[in-house]
Image (cartoon, grey):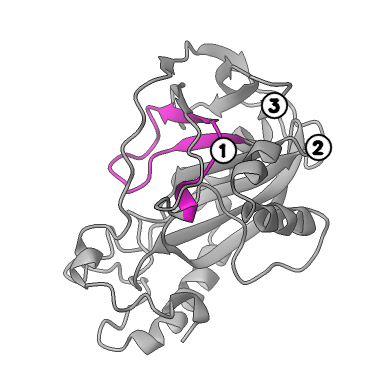
Amino acid sequence: MSKKFLGLIVVSLAMLACGILVPSTPAQPGVETVVAATFQALTPAAPPTQTPVNGTLVAVNNISFVIPTGIGSGAQVETIEAVPPSDNMPWWEIAPTYNKYHIQGYAIAGTFHTATIYVYPVNEYIQVNGDMAELFDSLKAIIAGQPLPENLPFLPAFNAAQMFHSNEQILAFQSGKGIRYLTQYGQAPYPVNNNALFYTFQGLTDDGAYYVAAVLPINAAFLSADGNPDTPLPADGVPFDWENFENMDQHFELVKQKLNATAPSAFNPTLTNLDALIQSIQVTGTN
């Protein structure tokens, strides 16, 4: 059995039916709606280059990006206040002040995760949570061309395990580089499904000052709608052995192979459009 799930299987199976992760309640202060404008998409500053694409420009604080047509209609910014370390504070909640950009009118709705872009100040993060330095160093190594680790760097921090990753690709955005991949998180083993699967980007600005992350739900036609054992699986889906969790790695590996073999245009939203959103991101200066 994969080491990343040791100690997790004791979680009640009832959690599997209700979504596994427990989402936090968004902080209310600092929320403002970004007024979006039609815009001809930016061209990435570094390879891979892209043909300009029609979309919606979002520009607020120290970030701008283009949401391709069909992905969303705008964004809402939310400032999350710093959470300093304390005796009773779990490590995944300790963070500096940072901004979240919620994509409005996203292409798919009702998924466990919501479409969001995050911008974290790196030095401030390390100051309040020194354990994150290892995550930042891991991402730097990947960007530099080092072999991928078993678990890829990921923010925001979840109290859950990275079940697998697929469709990995280094992407350049307007002010930095990073890696995009598909993944699913959970506190216990359960099938890869369209309710929980998401596209993520994890990147650093060229000056190392900001960490840019994105969580964007994505669907593939061969996956179960929600991973529930009572939900019918598509004919070309990958079965999950609910009676023998020791076989779960085979499920994840087969799903990974099918996801890697799926054409970028066959996903909903398409990988091409999600990559275009990421490649348009520009982060400058301070808030």
Query: Please, what secondary structure does the residue beneath circle 3 have?
Result: strand
x 51%, y 40%: residue: 84
Instruction: Kindly check if marks 1 and 2 are in contact, taking CB atoms under 8 A apart as contact.
Output: no
Instruction: Kindly check if marks 2 and 3 are in contact, taking CB atoms under 8 A apart as contact.
Output: no
Please rate how many residues cluster around mark 2, counting C-alpha atoms within 10 Å: few if below 14, some from 14 to 19, many from 20: some
Image spot of residue 255 (x, y percent): 46, 71
Q: Which mark is residue 206?
A: 2
Query: Please, what secondary structure does the residue beneath circle 2 have?
Result: loop
As for residue 98 lying within the magenta part, the answer is yes
* First to last magenta residue range: 91-120
Q: Which mark is residue 283?
A: 3
Image spot of residue 80 (x, y percent): 46, 30
As for residue 103 lying within the magenta part, the answer is yes
Structural distance between the alpha carbons of marks 1 and 2: 23 Å
Amino acid type, callout 3: Val
Mark sitting earlier along the chain (1/3) = 1
Q: Is residue 267 visible?
A: no
Query: Please, what secondary structure does the residue beneath circle 1 have?
Result: helix
Q: Is residue 125 above or below residue 181?
A: above
Q: Which residue is mark 1?
A: 273
